[in-house]
Structure formats: structure tokens, C-alpha cells
Image (cartoon, rainbow, N blue to C red):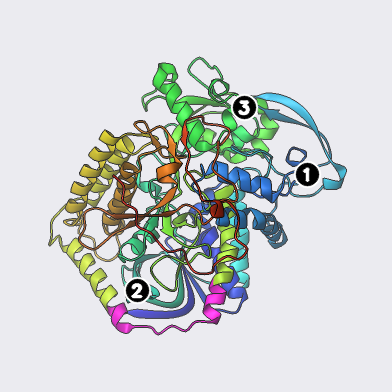
Amino acid sequence: MQVIYTDVLCIGAGLAGERVAVEAAMAGFDVVCLSIVPPRRSHSSAAQGGMQAALGNAIMGDGDSPDVHFADTVKGSDWGCDQEVARLFADTAPLVMREMAHWGVPWNRVVAGTHTYYKGGKPFEAEEKKEKHGLIHARAFGGTAKWRTCYTSDGTGHSVLYTLDNICLQYGVNIHDRVQAEAIIHDGQTCMGCIARCLRTGELIAYFASATLIATGGYGRIYRATTNAVICDGGGQIAALDTGIVPMGNMEAVQFHPTGTVPTDILVTEGCRGDGGTLLDVNEYRFMPDYEPEKAELASRDVVSRRMTEHMRKGLGVKSPYGDHLWLDIRHLGEKHITTNLREVYDICTNFLGVNPIHQLIPVRPTQHYSMGGVRTDRDGAAYGLNGLFAAGEAACWDMHGFNRLGGNSLAETVVAGRHIGKKIVEFLQGHSTTFSTAAMRDAAAKMSQRISDIASGRKGKESAVGLRNEMQDIMMEGVGIFRNEKDLKNAVDKLVALLERSEKIGLQSNSKGFTPEMSLALRVPGMIKLALCTAHGALMRTESRGAHTREDFPERNDRDWLNRTLSYWKEGESLPTLKYEEASPYFEMPPGERGYGGGKIIYADIPEEKLRKPDTTAEAKPETKSKKKA
């Protein structure tokens, strides 16, 4: 077996992985990025709308500041975020957006003079200031008090990823694509790298590294209807969870995007609504102002998705062979705007839906989109449980999003957190030496080789990986969706436990040798079911409604009992995760209150006075995890 040594191993080569890689490479360290696909095909390239940063250049962003951005982020999280991390993010984002411009990102720029913009489908005029001419522009996004979403038309992820990939080449980052990380090498205390599988040959490769980063994106493919690419199967989270030591954070927090297209589930950006698009029902009536008079279509994503679902439940959805949907109307924005600032939306609609959005309505409905949960880390990106293991981006629960993230915050997080965590990894490497254990490496490789052999031979059974995945996706859609209740969640957990037992008997249905896509799926499915169980079981135990986690049987946000973060551990041989809980935030710079949209009753907590102010000094150590039992 080939053994490769490096200083930093980034599992994932999307925006978060590459931004960490660049930071380490600029400091002179050897870096290897592993990627299932060529980096420029990473799912980061699919991000459309933009990155939030309080620059205040656009006239509609006048008066914006990191303080306002911080407040929007905390409200968006429904007070479930770590406010120390949210503050770090909001303060750093403007600097990082300018840095990305310096590296070559072609941000849309402010053009001085009077312009026509849209809000709620209605035009208004605003004059951009002369002194702001040529600076980075911004558009409106949901849940924000100001226009602060920096953008490059509606291809922001594509533009930033291509730019960052060029910087990786400039600094000599080594990219090993078509390689899939399968298991973490560790001795119970220290992470030393991973065992990976070459997707060209099927051979195993050992990577030894002093610091290992998980940046593999989300795990949306545990749901059938998702905007996530097929590679978003939670591979990094699975590898971490399988250690039995590293917990997942807030796995029950799953975001559904309001505008997944029907029937493809391909996303059309929130920028459509930010630029003035509206949501219409079967009667072509604009219904969102009835539910959210102030924010309307630009309430936070969890709220808009719930309101859309409520409206369809009233029988006001559009009937189709693929189920009920609603309409997104951007026709009034005009051909020039649609074919420039929303050109990817135009291409998606015409090529995949047969709809011309210049003249026709776009069929949409809420679709699974983003995972707030992931590998739990401290504020510096260090994973709980294993020294030398880090995580960033959607793969991580850092935790600036809490129970709902604002549009544009996650794409910004990839480069903001990537920069911050990259610097912390450099600090870690400068004061750290690693002793690589060949015994730990051989043990991890032997276990993986045995799994592959069992699956290839069908020795344990002939369960179909495809069949199990499809059943899991249906269970998640039916029982762990936008609206949740005890009966459906219990049913989902029971069914997933049975699936997990069956997954031990997966066998290939084909006779191919070497690499096969079926083998890749077969290796992933048991872990995907575990992630699904962390999500469903965590949702069952959390008897409140917060952000994207909506319990019909517990409609209140309960700060008294649930102002905390779920930690899910998976002990070897268990059929359910072990749940523990920790404080949502070390302190509350912004005390819990009403979001200003979404409605709902709040059961407030009696928070100690010392928790309501930022401490003079911040402890460097990771917060101690406290177990808290729930009835």
C-alpha cells in the first residue's frame, strides 16, 4: 500500500478546503488536498447568490456594519449559534471579501447614478453614491436588515472557486483528485491522517499528516429531494463519526431552501427574491405578505419554507405529476437583468425545465439544501475528541449558524472560516510534532480492506446498496422534513435502525473488479444511515421548535430547557447515537429575544448575569462538554 506524508491533509477541495490549504501553503507547509472530483467540480461551484459581508457600499446597504451583520446572524440562527464565532465571522468578512477581490474575484461593482431596483415585485429608484463608484456591490438576501450580499451575477461560487483554485496552483498545493477518504487514522487521542481509496483503481492509499482537515461539504443526499450534488454524501462526517470519539453537532438542524425547482430539485438562487422576485400560488396570488407583512419573501429560509408548505397544505399549491408546487415570478425584472445578473437561473430554467423565466413562471417548492450540523469544532476549527483533526465549511458545526443559516452566510463562511482556521492550523503546526503510528495505519487499512472484501464477495449477504439508500431517503422525506412530530420521528428512527442492521449485509450486485460506483456507494450507505439516525434521533429528543427544526407537537422555542447544542457520538456496535448537550454559546452578547419574523411563542430562560456580557479574556481551551439528560 502506498504511504504519502504531508504536513496538512485537506479532505475536500471546495472553497473551505482550498482556503485552508492556501493559508498553510503560504506559511511554507506541504499541503495535499483530496477530492472525489476535480476541485473546480466541487459543489462550492454550484453556489449562486453571493457572500454576506458588511461593506456598506450599495445605497441600500448604507449604514451597515459588522454589528448589524452579527445581529442578523444571531436572529437567523434563532439564538442557537455560538455568538463568539458569529462575532468573529461578522468582523472578519469585510476584510476577506476585499482579499478575494485582490486575488481576482470579479465582484459586481457599484455604478454611480440613479438605478431602478425591485422590492416585492415593485420597482423603486435609488441613487448610488459617486464616492462608492467601483466598489463591491451587494444585493438583498433573506433575514437581513441591509443589502450586504456580495455577488458575481448568480455564479458567485463558480467565480470564487476558480479564483481560489488558481491561488492553490500558485502556492504549490498538491491536489489528489478522484480520491475518496474512507477512514481516519488515529490512536484514540491523535489524528494522523486517513486511509483513502483511489477511484481510478480501487486501491487503498495511506495519508499521514500532522494536521488533517475535514471539508467535504454537506450530507444532503440522505434526503431524496435535495439541491445537493451526488457527491454530498457526508463522507467526511462519516469518517469522523466512525472514530467513536468525534461528535457531530446539531444534526437535527437541516435547512430546506424555498426555491428548489420542480421536478429537478436544482436550486434557483435566493438572489431571485433578493432582486425583487415574488412567490405566487395556484391563483397567481402573492401570498407571503399575508404571513410575513414586513419581510415577505425575504424572511429567513426556514420561515419562508414553512409558510410555503402551510400555503400548499391549504390546497393553494399548483397540482403537477410531481406533487404540489408554487410559482416564482421574476418576469418583471426584465430580459436584461435576467440574462445578466440571473443568467444561471435563466440557463437552468431553459435547459432543465423547458421554462423561459423572462416570460413564464418558475415551478418551485422547498427542497433540502443545507446542513447546519456537522463535525463539532471549537472556535478555531479543532474537532472535539482528536488532537490534530480540524473541520471547516458545511462539513463542520463551527457553529455560527445555530438552527438556521442566512443565505449568503455559508458561502462567506467557507473563506472566512477557511482563513481563520488555516491560520490556527499554522499555529498548531509551528508548536507541534507528530509521531506517526504505522500500527494505527495498518489497523485502519486492514479494517477497510476487510469491508471491501466482504462487500465484493457478498460474504455477509446480498443487500442492495442502492435499495437501502433509496429507502433511507424516503424515510427522511416522510418523517424528518420541514414539519416534525413525535409519531413520525419515532417511526423514522425505528425504520432507520432496521436499515442500519441490514446495511451490514451489503453485497455488490455487479461482478466488476477494481473501482465501481456501486462499491463507493456500498461503503458509504451504512455511514449515511448513521447520519440520518443522528438527525432523526436528535430531532425526536429535541422537544421544541427552533429555526429549521419545527415540532408541530412542541411549537414553542424553549430557551428554558433547550438553549443548547446537541452532540451526537456513535459508539461501536450501537444502533443509536449517544446524545449529549452543551451550552449554545459561552456568552450572549445579544440576549435571546424575538427574531422579528416567523412568529411563535418563546419560553425564555433565566440566564445568569455573567453570561450576558462578553468576558474580558477568552479562554483558549475548548469548552468542556456537559451531558444533560432529557425526558
Between tags 3 and 2, which lies in front? Answer: 3
Indicate the quadrant where residue 170 lies.
bottom right
Residue 333 spot, x, y in % from top left: 67, 28
> Which tag, 1 or 3, sits closer to the chain's start?
1
Q: Is residue 562 magenta?
A: no
**Given the image, on which type of amino acid does mark 3 rest?**
Glu
Main secondary structure along the magenta-highlighted residues: helix
Q: On the image, numbered disc 2 is attached to which residue? A: 185
Residue 311 in the figure: left or right of residue 63? left
Q: On the image, numbered disc 1 is attached to which residue? A: 110
Residue 73 spot, x, y in % from top left: 58, 46
Mark 2 touches mark 1? (CB < 8 Å): no
Residue 261 in the figure: left or right of residue 534? right
As drawn, 59 above or below 284: below
Label at residue 268: none
Indicate the quadrant where residue 204 lies.
bottom left
Name the residue nearer the viewer: 295 or 156: 295
Q: Is residue 432 magenta?
A: yes
Q: Quadrant of the C terminus?
A: top left
Secondary element at tag 2: strand
Q: Residue at x 49, y 69 (%)?
A: 621
Q: Residue at x 34, y 83 (%)?
A: 437
Secondary element at tag 1: loop
